[in-house]
Amino acid sequence: MEKICVAVRVRPPVKSSSSEDTHTPWKVEQNRISLHRSLPSGTPAPPALSYTFDHVFDQDSSNSSIYDLLTKDIIHAVVDGFNGTAFAYGQTSSGKTFTMNGSDNDPGIIHRAVKDIFAKTSLSTDREFLIRVSYMEIYNEEINDLFAVENQKLQIHESLDRGIFVAGLREEIVNNADQVLKLIEMGEANRHFGETNMNVRSSRSHTIFRMVIESKMKDASDDDYSTLDDAIRVSVLNLVDLAGSERIAKTGAGGVRLKEGKHINKSLMILGNVINKLSDGAKQRGHIPYRDSKLTRILQPALGGNAKTSIICTVAPEEVHIEESKGTLQFASRAKRITNCVQVNEILTDAALLKRQKIEIEELRKKLEGSHAGVLEQEILNLRNDMLKYELEREKLAMELEEERKSHRERITAQGSGSLKQYSKEETSDTCSTQQGDAFSTPNFKPIRNAFVAKRSYQSRTSEYSPLPDEFGDVADEDTWFKMNNGFIADLDSIQMTPARQASSVPSVDEISDCKADNDKEVQSLRRQLQEAIDEKNKFERQHKEQIAMNNHLMEEISKLQKETLLIQEIPQKLNESLANCKAVNEDVFSTFQSFAADEKSPTAKLLSSTSEIFKYLISTFEANVSMAMNGFKSTCKNSPVEENKTAQNLKDARRNSQYSDTYKDGTLGQQIALWKAEVSGEIKLIQERHESLEQESDINNHLLEASKERIQGLEKESQLLTEEKEKLLLAAFDSSKRLASLTQQNEKNLQDLACEIRRRKDLEEKIRQFSITYASRQNSLMSFHMEFKSKIDYLKAQSPVVSSVSPRSSVGC
Ligand code: ADP
Ligand code: MG
């Protein structure tokens, strides 16, 4: 029996900006703290309020002195196999975090404890150690892992082997202090802080830094743990920084801060209740409400249990905080009355991680022989951590199976046999199964001893599973502990002093063999269920793959259709371009024609203008067709952005689904583990979950598929309409271009004819001109002949008058 060590620390007063007055009503003398209030002169002084503790540290004390006087012994005891807990309690801003974490110049208790543990273990020549650490916070009554942010809302469990533990909490195996401090730094970053009126960086959660130290004699045989010297020691150190109790009015909290504050106050109040109950005399003490909050549940071994515990209560010295300080000191006074029952935790079973890892590590060491020593050590550490993670995963699965079993039993109990007898038998079977199933279901249950689970080191038995309860001399303690933790009221002192009193309630050998048979049956049925679940899972996986393939195919189709739609959308623009080209050609041709027909009234000019009119008419008809088609096309496409969005959404969904399925594929670690060990346990739960998730996924995929099909049908219709429209437009364009070509031909022909006509006319005119010339020259020659003839007649007349009267007539007649 050992009292909790309680100390008070008064933080230095905060210097206010307005005055340098650092007056404090609290006076510290050795291990006593008393309140001295200054009263108006003449007022009679009240009796001084005074408290005595194991230690009282004044404002000038350092973390180093606190560690040396309050915590160092506990830390050394932890290395020797005792459980240890140190926690800081006090109102907000009174210096709890400063005490636990410290500053650069004056490191806090955690920092010093870590260094000290490694210093002490390295000095030990006869024992070898395996140390692992974890770091958690309790924020708004939820346990979060500060080493792995994804581990949230963790659950507290208990087992006879491990006592109370947080399932799924990440543990890191470490081999030096720097490594631990780095991990803590990383964990600190994940912690919840917030600003209040009283502390700019107020801790809004309780944090628990935990070190588990396993050790065994260096020359102990690996195969034989049957003697006391060969037992493995497993001890747990909890270093706790509580969030501060706070008066909402003072902290000015609201919203999130208010909610946090309420949770903080509630859990601290329950801690106070637990301390109150424990500090009452053993006779008056009733039910201890450990289960009312996560904090007290986790600290249960430290409060009235199997742990060396120290509490440092921090006090803010300012006059304004007198009431809170008084509250803290009363809490400390009560805590001082608590006694714990502390003993070295020695175990002989396989539960110690050290033993299980030892063999594997030796194998690895052999494999790595020849490598550089440093690399080797690092490699071993990594492998150890991998093994630990793997075992944690198994542990999680085992816990889930355990819960599943429990609920299964509860269901059965509720269904029919509600009798108390039946129920108590099942309770017993539960206890047995935990023990017997140890070899495969909970291999790394680490024995964090509870106060009432006494030392087992003298039980030298090499069994496949943990020894059965009736083989313990202290079995009554376990039984009472078990009852107590299920809500029974027990007399703690009498439990510790009369260990065998309740031995009769331990299951008999017959009951245990019944349990065994029941368990075998259950294992068989679970195996069957597992096989069925695996088959079903494979079926779903196949279906899922097919659906993914179909989805991909549909996605390809959609993208093809989208491309086609884009091409179709370009058609009107191209038609417009060709129309503009036609127009330009027409205008060129027409202007060329006009240049030939100078006279506007000439038939050629008329022909030209009528041709141009026809052409213009054709072009405008064509234009009207194109614009109509374009309008139709636009109206069809009006909803397309929405549809495209839908398609994009569908694509995103499909991608998300495929990502999900990838994640799902990655998440088969638990499955592999379960298969590897061929354990029934965790697999069923996992597979059921997967089964459900696959079903959900399959539903989602089906919906997606339906949506995709509808969308594709819509798109197909749209595409068909567009194709028809496109064909019509193409036909119209083809007709127009044919007509345009024929018109152009006609025009060319007309042009040629015109050119021929012009040439013929020119020829004609030339001929006429030549004829006229010839005609004129002939006329001239005729005239000259006539003149010559006349002159000859005249001459002849003159020569002969008779002849002349006849001859002219005859000559003329010739
Ligand atoms: P709590 O964790 O109790 O809310 P903190 O530890 O955060 O309070 O302390 C509040 C402030 O007071 C911090 O700025 C801290 O540095 C300072 N402080 C607390 N105790 C001491 C001390 N003993 N010496 C110097 N500063 C201190
Ligand atoms: Mg704090």
Image (cartoon, helix red, strand yellow):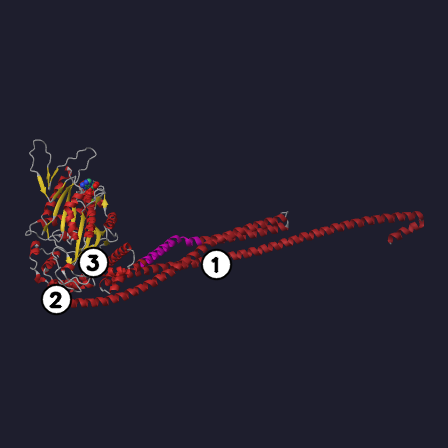
Write down the residue under mark 2: 511
Above or below — where is 766 with respect to 21? Answer: below
Q: Earlier in the sequence, mark 1 or mark 3?
A: 3
Occupied quadrant, residue 446: bottom left
Mark 1 crowdedness (10 Å alpha carbons): few <14, some 14-19, many ≥20: few
Q: Earlier in the sequence, mark 1 or mark 2?
A: 2
The answer to whether residue 170 shows anywhere in this view is no
Question: Residues under labels 3 and 2: Cα distance?
Answer: 33 Å
Q: Main secondary structure of the magenta part?
A: helix
Disc 2, SS: helix
Residue type, mark 2 in image: Glu
Q: Residue furthest left?
A: 283
Disc 3, SS: helix
- Is residue 509 part of the magenta span, yes or no? no
Tell me, for residue 684, which label it has, or none.
none
Write down the residue under mark 3: 354
Question: Residues under labels 1 and 2: Cα distance?
Answer: 87 Å
328 vs 691, nearest the viewer: 328
Q: Which residues are magenta?
A: 633-661
Residue type, mark 3 in image: Leu
640 vs 200, nearest the viewer: 200
Residue 26 at what x, y percent from top left?
Answer: 12, 38
Write down the residue under mark 1: 727
Residue type, mark 1 in image: Glu
